[in-house]
Image: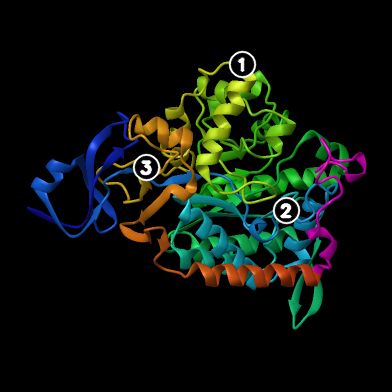
């Protein structure tokens, strides 16, 4: 008998390996942080013994899910000012430059990581900010607080950092004892902070760092002065070169018609580039993505996917790697990747008026092995295979909405939700057991999140932004006076 640390046995294994093997009564053997066997339960029992065994009877054993696009900071701002003109985005921009503290970023990081953990998302990308690509990269304290918060929960995170869009300098602020102090931040300042976070955190524990720059679209060239636009292009190339030198993912948020062509002309695409949203791409841009091996983060539940369509089906048919992102957690969506898989299938089937589009197994690939490929981590995570990291999720199928226990892969993808996850293992460590985190107390995370959200409202005077807007009830659409979000 071979002694291992942990055996998970008796469940239906959905491996997501190269053959997409499903084992009806299977088991996974884990030694340290690696998978050493994925076989029928009887075979594992015959060959391996373990100091601990988890009974997965009545459950699905699957790889940890991967969310390829979300925003740090949003978790404490979700729904604030929502459907009140552009106030939500304005709040993000102000909060991420002048309204937030390191304590805010720590509290939000823990809350978002805990949400991911309890939904079976073991790896996620988090941009350190949002809005119009407003990054909190004026000081390492904010990124450090975020990384420390995630690390306390135990999930994997790819933290994307980089500069804001020109013109620079931009006003940022710190808060001490209720007093705000403003200062000016240049591109060089933000580059140095991003570099410092890269040196300090990339490869530390379960944290990886990615680099980003703002997307340059047609309206930016029209709105910017020629000098600012030339500066933006030069800055993009500097950050992109740094990402290549460091061997980290390069990402951009908010691509749409024309911007991929611009990115290609700047020479910033490639297999280590991850472009989010990618709505209304031209046929030529679809070809560029496929030919350059560029990866796409498709966010089917995002507002961008209402305003335009990501041609994910056409991209995949052209040979591109497309993975699903939540764009979480705000203004109107969670980090539940089951929700986003289901939304993705309906989104594209509605477009084509064809229920055969995007089979459920493909949707599952888009949050597991395809997502790992999009991050360049397919050799480590994304499937249950010998030698890979032991990132394993158990889903309890003994629930009314998941019964009867037949066609389990179909039931998992069409009917499950994040609350059906009962056990999560990352690096061979059980970090969620019987629905409870093992590293951290949820009530303390929620208490800290509530405290920091209230403090933000007070600092920024956002009391009117947390009220119900006119038209919430009794209308088929918001009154025109509310504007559009």
Q: Secondary structure at mark 1?
A: loop
| Residue nearer the viewer, 286 or 358 | 358
| Residue nearer the viewer, 395 or 5 | 395
**Which badge, 1 or 2, comes first in the chain's sequence?**
2
As drawn, the label of residue 79 is: 2
When the figure is inspected, residue 140 is found, relative to residue 12, above or below; the finding is below
As drawn, the label of residue 14 is: none
Query: Which stretch appears magenta?
Result: 460-485
When the figure is inspected, residue 341 is found, relative to residue 449, above or below; the finding is above
Left or right? Give the position of 144 relative to 139: left
**Which badge, 2 or 3, comes first in the chain's sequence?**
2
| Residue nearer the viewer, 85 or 37 | 85
When the figure is inspected, residue 466 is found, relative to residue 176, above or below; the finding is above
Q: Which residue is mark 3?
A: 397
Is residue 89 on the magenta stretch? no
Q: Secondary structure at mark 2?
A: loop
Q: Secondary structure at mark 3?
A: loop
Image location of residue 157, percent across then percent down: 49, 55
Left or right? Give the position of 146 relative to 26: right
Callout 3 crowding tier (Cα within 10 Å): few <14, some 14–19, many ≥20: many
Q: Quadrant of residue 428?
A: bottom left
* Residue drawn at x 72%, y 50% as measured from the top left: 133
Q: CA distance from mark 1 to mark 2?
A: 32 Å
Q: Quadrant of residue 475?
A: top right
Evaluate whether residue 287 shows in this view.
no
Outermost residue to the right:
481
């Amino acid at each position: 008998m071979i002694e291992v640390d942990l055996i998970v046995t008796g469940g239906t294994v959905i491996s997501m390996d190269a053959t997409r093997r499903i084992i009806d009564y299977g088991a996974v053997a884990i030694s340290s942080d690696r998978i050493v066997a994925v076989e029928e339960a009887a075979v594992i029992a015959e060959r391996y013994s373990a100091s601990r065994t988890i009974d997965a009877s009545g459950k699905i054993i699957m790889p940890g899910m991967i969310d390829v696009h979300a925003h740090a900071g949003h978790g404490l701002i979700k729904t604030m000012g929502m459907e009140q003109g552009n106030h939500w985005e304005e709040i993000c921009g102000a909060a991420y430059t002048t309204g937030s503290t390191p304590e805010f970023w720590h509290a939000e990081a823990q809350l978002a990581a805990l949400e991911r953990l309890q939904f079976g998302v073991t790896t996620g990308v988090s941009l350190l900010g949002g809005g119009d690509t407003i990054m909190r990269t004026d000081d390492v304290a904010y990124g450090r607080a975020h990384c420390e918060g995630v690390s306390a929960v135990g999930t994997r995170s790819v933290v994307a950092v980089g500069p804001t869009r020109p013109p620079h300098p931009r006003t940022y602020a710190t808060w001490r004892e209720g007093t705000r102090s403003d200062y000016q931040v240049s591109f060089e300042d933000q580059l140095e902070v991003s570099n410092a976070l890269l040196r300090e955190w990339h490869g530390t524990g379960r944290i990886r760092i990615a680099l980003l720059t703002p997307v340059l679209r047609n309206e930016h060239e029209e709105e910017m002065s020629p000098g600012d636009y030339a500066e933006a292009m030069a800055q993009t190339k500097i950050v992109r070169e740094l990402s290549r030198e460091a061997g980290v993912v390069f990402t951009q948020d908010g691509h749409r018609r024309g911007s991929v062509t611009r990115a290609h002309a700047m020479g910033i695409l490639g297999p280590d580039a991850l472009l989010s949203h990618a709505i209304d791409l031209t046929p030529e841009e679809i070809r560029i993505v496929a030919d350059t091996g560029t990866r796409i983060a498709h966010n089917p539940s995002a507002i961008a996917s209402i305003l335009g369509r990501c041609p994910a089906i056409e991209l995949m048919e052209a040979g591109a790697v497309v993975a699903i992102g939540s764009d979480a957690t705000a203004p109107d969506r969670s980090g539940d990747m089951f929700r986003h898989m289901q939304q993705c299938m309906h989104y594209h089937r509605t477009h084509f008026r064809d229920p055969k589009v995007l089979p459920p197994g493909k949707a599952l690939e888009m949050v597991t092995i395809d997502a790992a490929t999009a991050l360049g981590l397919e050799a480590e995570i994304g499937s249950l295979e010998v030698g890979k990291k032991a990132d394993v999720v158990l889903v309890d199928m003994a629930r009314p909405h998941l019964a009867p226990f037949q066609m389990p892969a179909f039931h998992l993808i069409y009917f499950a939700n994040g609350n059906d996850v009962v056990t999560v293992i990352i690096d061979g460590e059980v970090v969620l057991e019987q629905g409870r985190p093992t590293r951290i107390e949820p009530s303390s995370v929620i208490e800290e999140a509530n405290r920091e959200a209230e403090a933000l409202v007070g600092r920024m005077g956002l009391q009117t932004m947390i009220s119900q807007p006119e038209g919430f009830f009794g209308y088929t659409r918001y009154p025109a006076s509310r504007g559009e979000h």
